[in-house]
Image (cartoon, grey):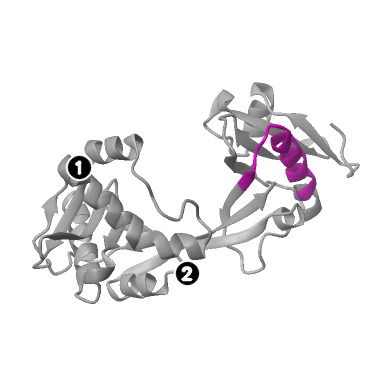
């Protein structure tokens, strides 16, 4: 496929294109045949690629390697992929890219707009003072209270950042995931109600949530300290991710010794 740039050529992605990119020193996705899209050649040399998972659905996260491509060449590559996915009925495309103070001009010229920014944080300190809060492990009997807690705790974040659905609903998939990972999920009750919950596994803290009715009691700090200590006990370096929008959470994590390791920006394009 010849493009507007005389030096840029786009080729349908296949195993041969993947091998060419790898030989040129460019990273290639691990999805193999589970993706479709285009390889970009610049001046007869492999220069980058843009791919989309072959799965069905209205929303898809794109995979992108910009390699040696300039902003306008990035735009042409992405526009070809956008046309492909629009024909296949996609309604929303997203890109997860390193945060740049000057933005991401190539994708933005192709129509993508900044959505939100995420900070990945790491803790490299000693064990934290063990909280006195009586945390206990998750079991399936707490699925509905856990699901309601997560939905309420993150409703404002999801609504203000337009992450749909705003209110989370029960699902078999979530329930099975929680059951499989129950040893890494910890809960806290107050006045007979589920007040806080979190996850600590695989080196990551996640799902840290405090019911609005119990905020201001130090449970967020207790959740974080408890999770950090469980990871350290397993020899894992604790990490977590938080939206830059959530300034109170970022401030808490910094005060507890976390430092920003990487910032990423999610961009979106509504078709």
* Residue 196 vertical position relative to residue 172 in the rendered view, above or below: below
Q: Is residue 163 left or right of residue 140?
A: right
Residue 46 can be seen in this image = no
**In front of the other: 234 or 180:** 180
Residue, x 87% and y 39% (percent of image)? Answer: 3
Left or right? Give the position of 132 relative to 52.
left
Find residue 260 and report its horizontal and vertical position in percent.
42, 66
Q: Are marks 2 and 1 in contact (CB under 8 Å)?
A: no
Label 1: which residue?
182
Residue topped by disc 2: 245
Camera sees residue 92: yes
Q: Where does the magenta region start and end?
A: 75-93
Q: Residues within 10 Å of mark 1 (few under 14, many from 20)?
A: some
Give the left or right position of residue 191, taking residue 173 as reference: left
Is 92 part of what is drawn in magenta? Answer: yes
Write the residue at 68% across / 47% down: 66
Q: Position of residue 186 (x, y in %)?
A: 18, 53
Looking at the image, tell me whether mark 2 or mark 1 is earlier in sequence order: 1
Residue 172 position, x and y percent, is 32, 35
């Amino acid at each position: 496929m010849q493009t507007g740039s005389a030096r840029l050529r786009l080729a349908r992605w296949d195993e041969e294109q993947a091998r060419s990119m790898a030989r040129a020193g460019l990273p290639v996705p691990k999805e193999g045949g589970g993706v479709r899209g285009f390889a970009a050649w610049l001046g007869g040399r492999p220069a980058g690629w843009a791919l989309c998972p072959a799965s069905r659905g209205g929303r898809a996260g794109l995979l992108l390697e910009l390699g040696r491509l300039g902003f306008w060449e990035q735009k042409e590559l992405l526009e070809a992929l956008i046309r492909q996915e629009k024909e296949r009925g996609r309604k929303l495309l997203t890109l997860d890219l390193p945060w740049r103070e000057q933005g991401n001009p190539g994708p933005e010229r192709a129509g993508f707009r900044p959505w939100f920014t995420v900070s990945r944080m790491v803790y490299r300190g000693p064990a934290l003072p063990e909280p006195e809060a009586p945390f206990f492990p998750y079991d399936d009997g707490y699925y509905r209270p856990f699901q309601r807690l997560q939905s309420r705790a993150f409703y404002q974040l999801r609504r203000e950042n337009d992450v749909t659905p705003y209110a989370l609903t029960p699902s078999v998939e979530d329930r099975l995931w929680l059951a499989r990972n129950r040893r890494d999920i910890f809960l806290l009750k107050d006045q007979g109600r589920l007040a806080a919950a979190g996850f600590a596994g695989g080196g990551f803290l996640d799902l840290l949530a405090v019911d609005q009715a119990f905020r201001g009691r130090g449970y967020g700090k207790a959740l974080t300290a408890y999770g950090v200590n469980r990871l350290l006990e397993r020899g894992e370096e604790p990490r977590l991710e938080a939206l830059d929008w959530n300034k109170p959470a970022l401030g808490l994590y910094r005060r507890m010794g976390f430092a920003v390791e990487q910032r990423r920006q999610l961009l979106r394009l509504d078709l």
